[in-house]
Amino acid sequence: MTLLSIETLTKRFGGVVALDRLSLTITAGEIHALIGPSGCGKSTALRLIAGFEQAESGAITMNGRRIDGLKPEARDIGMVFQDYALFPHLTVADNIAFGLRRLDKSAREAAVRDHLALMRLQGLEGRRPDQLSGGQQQRVALARSLAARPRLLLLDEPFSNLDASLRETARREMRDVLRASGMTALFVTHDREEALSLSDRVTVLKAGRVEQTDRPDRVYQRPASAFVAGFLGRTNLLQGMAEGGRARTVLGPLPIEPEAHGPVTLSLRPQGLALVAEGGAEATVTDRIYRGQEVTYLLRAADGTALQLDTTDAPATPAVAPGARVQLEAVAPGVVVG
Amino acid sequence: MLVPLVYLVVRAAETQATELAFLVFRPATAQLLANTLSLVVCVLALSTAIALPLAVLVTRCRLPFPWLWPVLFTLPLAVPGYVMAYALIGLSGYYGPLNQVFGMRLPRLEGLSGATLALSLYVYPYLFLNLRTVLTTLDPALEESARSLGHSAVSTFLRVVLPQLKAAFLSGWLVIALYTLGDYGAIALMRYDVFSSAIYSQYAGAFEVYYAAWLALMLIALAGLFLAAEARAARRLHLARTGTGTARVLPRAPLGRMALPAALFIALVVSASLGLPVSVILFWLSRAPEAIDWPAVAATALQTVTIAGPVALLAMAAALPVALVTTRFPGRAAFLAERMVYLGYAVPALPFALAMVFFSLAVIPFFYQSMTLLIATLTLHFLALALGPVRSRLLQLGPRTEEAARSLGHGAFAAFRRVTLPQLMRALVAGGLLVFMVVAKELPITLLLSPTGTQTLAMTVFARSSEGALVDAAPYAGLMILFSSLFVGLVLTRSGRAAGKTS
């Protein structure tokens, strides 16, 4: 069931177009990631939904009701800010209680207690925000927004201010809490690993427009454009001539999806290429990057196309030195991206 | 700095015990205390009522000509309190513009209400500037968070913004309270009896010098009490910004239905604090019965410059070593030196001048009522103003560039002269200009310590106004405003440029 739908939203700052007829739907209960390079309009989209900015045209509807004319406080939409925006003059408990003024005293205290427990903040209720670590501040911000029980929670780069060592745990914890409370969440990030690992659906934004919305595995495996393919991970872009389910490329005939005809651009992840002893396409090794668990070879195909290939660093696979001539084979289908 | 203050205590201690009970701790003294405190409370209340709405309008609302308003709301600083009082008094009366132009007779403004009005219209910019700075640098995400947690704009202001303004309120109120304690001109013109006017009349009338000493000590104690109360309250605030994100600027809200009341409020404040003094001065200038004695005005202006100039130069020369010692070699001695400088500024002007009188009479009678003593006293009193900018600039610069010069083969002195000093010049000059302007407007110390026959602009305006010779005071008051507004303009553009640089 659709909770929030955005239709052809346009927003300019001065002469610069931040959002260009953006359309998006958020399903009730899902965790939805909005990802794109900086300046793509993802934070602007969040601020329009929250009501801090007004769009020039387009509509925002929640549960079938137009909300884009409402003030932020009337929208029933919570927001966790990038720098958390905890109120420095209030204690942790008062911060969490801030959105609960419609409840009576005992209900409010109970809600604060529940959310302190939920976010593992017991014992910190009397502290001020400046007496908390970064991770604790982030959990207070989340508790404060969840306690107000909004129908939709927006999160603006919620993990960007955390140390890399904390990020992994914080992500899992946030996902579990959101799932347990059945909260619908839309979060903005520029970190592809975060978007892919945390969300039910991912929307990739470029220059104020949606490039693709789909499940994380689908946007990674079946990118709709060369931009999406390259933004979500390293990839090889090959030119080819498609004839239905196959295409002729520099690597020889290659299975492709979906079916196509005529000249195409194909995306093939580095894991989709393998070194073979014989019968493959010829290539020259230009460099070898050792990454620990895996090794990346940078190669040049016969027609000069630059390629990369990932292989596991097993004792059985002998290292190949730069300059060596090798043979390649595709072990995954090429995805038509253009 | 401390020695003169000791002489104040010495003089006070000479009082006989019986006289002490009879003359010092009498109901009249209690009345002075009550008057002084009620004036402070009234000035704080009125200047807050002016400054807070203005600061919110300037930082949160969409106004036409946004660059203009901060300037207009800061310019009243250029109108000294006694000129403001002169304007308020000059407005009424039989020959005043209200009666001559509009046929309205108002009673002459005086007492608590008159003094409150004259001081508030002049000092509110101190609070306005403080509040504006915090309101513009406050993380907008705080207000947005409160809104998305279901609070209205008004509730957000009361529960989130106002608490963040506490520190700005405290420091602004402290400056205004200390100023009110120290002011002599405006309050005396309004014929309101407070500590400072009592000290002056006791001293000038040479009635009971030890009573003046006692009053001065009480006034100093009161100022110390305010300082301690502010420091205590400020310590309990928790306002550290926790986020690390870059600050955005909050989008300004259109005024909507509030446009008319806001415009009326702004018009009222600007016309009272700027329009009034300028138009009253112009009115009286136009009523001058005979040609204005311009050579006399010029001589007075020159006399003002010959006092303010040396004080500014001396303050700059003294500020540099104090700032260097306190920032580069922080320790107990440096800390004490710095505290002394600020103490000299915090002691209200009249008690400070009185202490210098007692000190000079006892130790260096040769210098009593000399230009040297006047200039030394003014320098000691206003040194803190020159120290502030130099100190913060030195802290900002840090020792790195100088260390780089040392490693490139320059000696300690050469490195300082070639690397740090050029970067310090602007701050040094800014501090000097500030001192110059403040000394040029200064009244009570000059009144008490200047050699017989000295006539500065401030003294002339004050003397003529208190005699009711409003026509005679007009050219001096006009020159005073013109002169001060040049300096305020200079300070404003400098701070504007500095702000532009950091953003």
Image: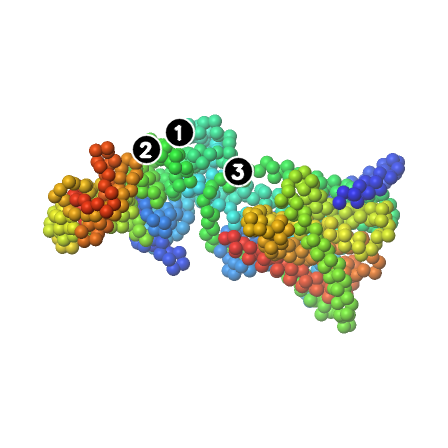
Q: How crowded is mark 1: few (under 14 residues within 10 Å), some or many (20 or more)?
A: some
Q: Is residue B176 visible?
A: no
Which three-letter amino acid code belongs to the residue tagged 1?
Leu
Q: N-terminal of the two: label 3 or label 2? A: 3
Give the Cα distance between marks 3 and 2: 31 Å
- State how the image is colored: rainbow
Give the Cα distance between marks 1 and 2: 12 Å
Q: N-terminal of the two: label 1 or label 2? A: 1
Asked whether the residues under marks 3 and 2 belong to the same chain, the reply is yes
Q: Which residue is drawn at 23% across and 41% down?
A: A320
> Badge 3 sits on which subunit?
A
Residue B306 position, x and y percent, is 75, 61
The quadrant where residue B421 appears: bottom right
Which three-letter amino acid code belongs to the residue tagged 2?
Arg
In the rendered image, which residue does mark 2 sit on? A179
Residue B171 position, x and y percent, is 62, 45
> Badge 1 sits on which subunit?
A
Q: Report helix, strand or loop for mark 3.
A: loop
Residue B187 position, x and y percent, is 74, 52
Which three-letter amino acid code belongs to the residue tagged 3?
His
Residue A89 - label: 3
Residue A280 position, x and y percent, is 14, 44
In the rendered image, which residue does mark 1 sit on? A118
Asked whether the residues under marks 1 and 2 belong to the same chain, the reply is yes
Residue B416 - label: none
Q: Report helix, strand or loop for mark 1.
A: helix
> Badge 2 sits on which subunit?
A
